[in-house]
Image (cartoon, rainbow, N blue to C red):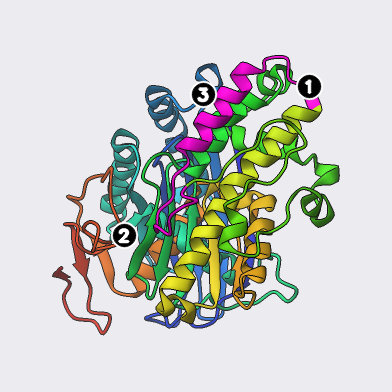
Amino acid sequence: MRSLLQCGHKGILLGFRPQRLRYLTTLAIETSCDDTGVAVLRHTPESTELLFDERISSDNRAFKGIHPIVAAKGHSEALAPLVRRAIDTLPAAEDDSQKSCDAGGVRRQVPDFVSVTRGPGMRSNLGIGLDMAKGLAVAWGVPLVGVHHMQAHALTPRLARALGMSMGEEVISKEGPEFPFLSLLVSGGHTQLVHSTGLTEHSIVATSGDIAIGNLLDQTARDILPPEVFEASEHVMYGRLLEAFAFPPENSSTSAYDAVFTPPASRSAEMTPPSTGYEWNIPTPFRQTRKLAFSFSSIYTHVHDLATSRPSMSLPERRALAQHTMMAAFTHLAGRLCIALDDKPELRAAKTLVVAGGVASNKFLTHVLRSMLAVRGFGDIQIVAPPIELCTDNAAMIAWTGMEMYQAGYESELTVTGIGKWYMDPEVGDGILGVDGWVRRDTKGSTPENS
């Protein structure tokens, strides 16, 4: 088990209207996949502070991917110790009128509520986090808030700005992004273009019909990377290895990206794969259609067959293959985004594109998106991506989304269970509020009601 993250951030938060003039605190738990995360977030009318944020990833290297049993075992081993450490960071109790718990001989204030990922994700893993969260909520006598994992990714830039963290802007903003905004949710399990018009109002504009982009990068990395690079990895985030191999840190700059990527200025230009300098190229999917959907399986098949047929590929050719694999995938993402903006005028009211999820940490992706939006006439759209530590699954984003939901009056019944597939868009599935177990609290003080 490897502790990957521990950080403390503090920043000003504007625009929130808490119910009372004291801070709100939540302890949050994330166990949707193979990362066990726990965070403590404290919010006042003037500021937001991350008191605790740690993540431990299960060791799946022997399987070259995530093994469900290993991931579940990892949660069982890591979660309780993380919660114990998180409790030690809760503020000290100031007087006897406050709910408190004993932590190492110190009376500490009990959180106002407990946040936990309810879905989507691996049901067995979700259950481990939910059971711990329910136990804490019952023991402390506080509400539970079950959080939608993808909603949390979409709202992560709001957390980053509240904490005063840079997302590549020339001037760091402490507000927003305000609704409406667009999100590209890109991870190992999801690839979605989402139009967000409110806290719980999210419509899916395009989604992948086969594999997710993160899965594509992980899988093609196994074929492209030199064996010594692949075997030396300390983790199974092979997509990150692919990026580092394609653009070594000393060459991961705008000039290095421009040397291999010229943004197609039109749909017709997008249909022609760029030259690689070798006898092969990587076509982008859906070249002959304006269908609002993503597809990455054809890229995987093409790259896998190419790498298999050329086992003695030189290092420069492997690097070119890594670059053009990412280029085809990212051009496909950006191309579908441009089609959506062309064909759906209502999306143009959104002036921010949030790029979130594990693949959002890929700097070449941001470059491709920014370049293509500019040459296609959408250069006024601001692209924001969270800092790398907030791109992967983490409990800080669960704490933030729990905070936004709680302040909007939403709590969860203690009977809720994990949801493996949970669509944010009510036109596609239940939507965030369409599942059972929500309790709507009257924020003016009346009795909670089931919703």
Residue 426, percent from left and from top: 24, 63
Tell me, yes or no, whether the highlighted magenta stretch contains residue 109: no
Residue denoted by label 1: 314
Residue identifier under label 3: 60
Please state which of the two labelled residues, at mark 1 or mark 3, is closer to the viewer.
1
Q: Nearer the viewer, mark 1 or mark 2?
A: 1
Point 53% across, 37% down: residue: 299
Instruction: Give the camera-side residue of 158 and 329.
Output: 329
Disc with the residue nearer the chain's start (1 vs 2)? 1
Q: What range is drawn magenta here?
A: 286-315
Q: State the residue at coordinates (61%, 66%).
A: 384
The Cα atoms of the two marked residues, 1 and 2, are separated by 45 Å
- Sort mark 2 into few (<14), some (14-19) or many (20+) by Cα contacts within 10 Å: many
Nearer to the camera, 254 or 80? 254
- Of 432 and 261, nearer the camera is 261
Determine whether the residue tagged by mark 1 lies in a helix, strand or loop: loop
Q: Which three-letter amino acid code belongs to the residue tagged 2?
A: Met
Q: Position of residue 89 (x, y in %)?
A: 54, 53
Q: Please determine whether, in this image, residue 304 is positioned above or below residue 14.
A: above
Label 2's element? loop
3D distance between C-alphas at marks 1 and 3: 29 Å
Q: Residue at x 77, y 41 (%)?
A: 247
Q: Is residue 320 above or below residue 134?
A: above
- Where does label 2 land, which residue? 424
Q: Nearer the viewer, residue 115 or 319?
A: 319
Mark 3 nearby-residue class (10 Å; few <14, some 14–19, many ≥20): many
Task: Answer left or right for 173 relative to 104.
Answer: right
